Amino acid sequence: MGNIAFRLLLTFNATSLLVIIFCIQNNFSVKYFYPHPVTMGMPDYLSYLAYTIAPVLLTWLSLALSRFLGKDEFKEGETETIEHANNSFLPSYLGYFFVALSISDWQALIFVYGILFVFTFLSQALYFNPIFLLFGYEFYNVRTQSGTTIFLISRERYKKPSTVIIPVARRINDYTFIESR
Amino acid sequence: MDQVLVRVKRLRKTPYKKLLSDTKLYQTLDPTAVSMVRYNPDHNLDEDAWFKIDKFSEQEFYIGELNGDLDTKDCDDLSKGKFRDISCLISIQGKDIYFQKVTPSSFITRKIIQFGEAAHLEESANRIIVKSVPDAVFIKGSDVLLFKDISSVSSIFPGIDQLYKEATEAEVKAFLNSEFIQLVKPYDHSSVSKPNRKRLALVNDTLQAMPAAQRENLVEYIKDYCKEAVTLTADGERFELSTDQQLKFVLYGIEERFYTTMHSQEKRLANSVQAIG
């Protein structure tokens, strides 16, 4: 149960940008949702800033929660190849921008976001969230000696496979691991 | 890091799943502190002793997945729905690997009353009892497999029961036709019990290697120790077998299980032996 909740949180963090862009594009600031004398006088950019900070905080929460996940270990010599993967997910992320910019009403947003959310959740691969970069995390594709390909999220800057020695890596899902601090 | 994997029934392609991490299920076994006996189906194991199989990795029933370092990253997490299908717990503790067979009786499905601040009833579901002593331990460094009971490890290491050999029908028949045995009807090869078939399989080798002179002394030797337990033919040269019990004593005799103590001169039977020196 906890695991599913955690994965829902990660999926939300990874896809929330779509909703934020939609709100900014259509001028839906806080006063639109919550008309109140205080919010009415607030400049729009403050609302947009709040929208942007929300997923950052949630991402921080998900990183903090990751220490309750199951542990694995990367021993010396287990890693055969390692490849930096920061760039590889950016195209798909840019896709969110364009989709969000072309949505014009709530109904379309709910459908598009719903579909995107479900597929991100089920694919288990698109959890990577650019906000991790803000926290200093890097993304790597790692191939182990037995040929298994793993997606590793880590704050270390790995270049050589032989340097990948991780005493505790948390398992987000069967293909994605995050190195604990 | 210590890890616990499980083997799941009916999953041919990926039978191994990850269950726990950073956990030791069993107390660490110190191979120097326990006594080990090379496996022999007729041996009655002392409580603190283990059967051992040397050169485990060269045996037919070795599990290839144990080669090298078992990498838990290759295994998926166990899903909740598959919990009931666990057939074996595999606890990787340091370099050694501990095994426990999981049977339907290993699962608890009882109601439990728990008393915290107030008593409440707990319906326990999805719980496995972890035994205090594992069924088998693989000491990787010395390539030795330790176990206590071959029947409980035979599902963990398919094919290990080949060590537990019973005499075939033909071997039993051949033995009962030996020159020193006279069968009394209705006792015949089909009435030989399972434990005796097991002993017979071991005795056959001894008998093949036995010099003729010793073979002749056999009758004397056995007669000397168990006058009441065995019956001889009228000429006193053959055993008359009419019960399984009598066959057992003859088999013990061939294995030289009868002896006299050195000081008290007491006649004894060793129902389990271990070669020393």
Image (cartoon, coloured by chain):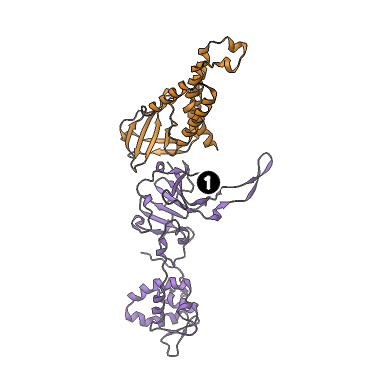
Q: Which chain is purple?
A: B
Neighbourhood count class around disc 1 (C-alpha, 10 Å): few under 14, some 14–19, many 20 upward: few
**Subunit ID for the residue under disc 1:** B
* Quadrant of res B55: bottom left
Taking the spot 58% from the left edge, 18% from the top edge, the residue there is A33
Q: Is residue B135 above or below residue A143?
A: below
Residue A96, percent across and down? Answer: 44, 25
Please name the color used to draw chain A: orange
Residue farthest to the right, as pictured: B118
Q: Is residue B83 above or below residue B210?
A: above
Is residue A31 visible in the rendered image? The answer is yes
Please identify the quadrant where the C terminus of chain B is shown: bottom left
Residue B201, percent across and down? Answer: 40, 72
* Quadrant of res A153: top left
Please identify the quadrant where the N terminus of chain B is shown: top left
Taking the spot 44% from the left edge, 73% from the top edge, the residue there is B197
Q: Is residue B59 above or below residue A84?
A: below
Residue A57, percent across and down? Answer: 50, 23
The one nearer the camera, B110 or B115, is B110
The one nearer the camera, A167 or B161, is B161
Identify the amino acid type marked 1.
Answer: Gly
Question: At numbered mark 1, what does the secondary structure look like: helix, strand or loop?
Answer: helix
Residue farthest to the bottom, as pictured: B234
Q: Which residue is mark 1?
A: B81
Residue A115, percent across and down? Answer: 49, 31
The one nearer the camera, A34 or B50, is A34
Taking the spot 36% from the left edge, 41% from the top edge, the residue there is A148
> Is residue B245 toward the left or the right of residue A80 in the image?
right
Tally the numbered discs. 1
Is residue A10 visible in the rendered image? The answer is no
